[in-house]
Image (tube, rainbow, N blue to C red):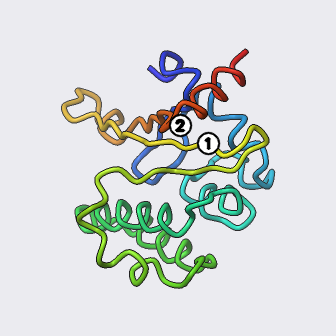
Amino acid sequence: MLAGHGPYPALGIDRHWTLTAANRGVAPLIASAAPWLLHSPVNVLRLSLHPEGLAPRIANLAQWRWHLFMRLRQQIDLSADPVLVELLQELRGYSAPGGDEDDRFGDERAAHIVVPLTLITERGTLAFISTTMVFGTPVDVTSSELAIESFFPADAATAEALQGIAK
């Protein structure tokens, strides 16, 4: 599934946001992160929001951070998983651009059906929308804890850049 999504980035994560697999479209986007963030096990939330990860290259970091925190809080509300609670506390300790994400986007929450990820790269600014697929009726318990995060180009320039990277 991941390979078939190429050249657009897609990754598999477990219930703790640990990277389990990624297609070739992901590597060029995360290459600038500090090497220690890329050593297994890679936590994709930490990789995204850490100041030595993708955070300095995310043009809409406050909005993306808010989006990820909302998803993580929903998981915590459903599971009360102590690992996720600890992860949220860690992530909240990272510097937040423009103040607390709750204050910045508090009135706009209902309007956020799709939150873009706008990433500054060597090929210019790339804009993505993402979808998450969770395996809902697996036979294997391990599969029930996996999700696929697929990123699609949000504009023609991003699609063209990703096609160029794939060549």
Determine which of the numbered discs, if any, sits on residue 164 in the image.
Answer: none
Residue at horizontal 55%, vertical 27%? 8
Q: Amino acid at mark 1?
A: Leu
Instruction: Answer with the quarter of the image where residue 19 lies.
Output: top right
Q: Which residue is mark 2?
A: 20
Q: Position of residue 107 (x, y in %)?
A: 29, 77
User: In the shown orientation, is residue 108 left or right of residue 51?
Assistant: left
- Quadrant (top left, top right, bottom left, bottom right) of the C terminus: top right
Cβ atoms at labels 1 and 2 below 8 Å apart: no
Q: Position of residue 123 (x, y in %)?
A: 75, 37
Q: Give the number of the mark in front: 1 or 2.
A: 1
Q: Position of residue 141 (x, y in %)?
A: 29, 36
Residue at horizontal 67%, vertical 55%? 54
Of 127 and 64, the residue lying toward us: 127
Residue at horizontal 71%, vertical 21%? 164
Mark 2 burial class by Cα count in 10 Å: few <14, some 14-19, many 20+: some
Q: Position of residue 135 (x, y in %)?
A: 28, 33
- Quadrant (top left, top right, bottom left, bottom right) of the N terminus: top left
Q: Which residue is mark 1?
A: 126
Q: Secondary structure at mark 2?
A: strand
How many marks do you count on the picture?
A: 2
Mark 1 burial class by Cα count in 10 Å: few <14, some 14-19, many 20+: many
Of 131 and 104, the residue lying toward us: 104
Q: Amino acid at mark 2?
A: Thr
Marks 1 and 2, Cα distance to the nearest angstrom? Answer: 24 Å
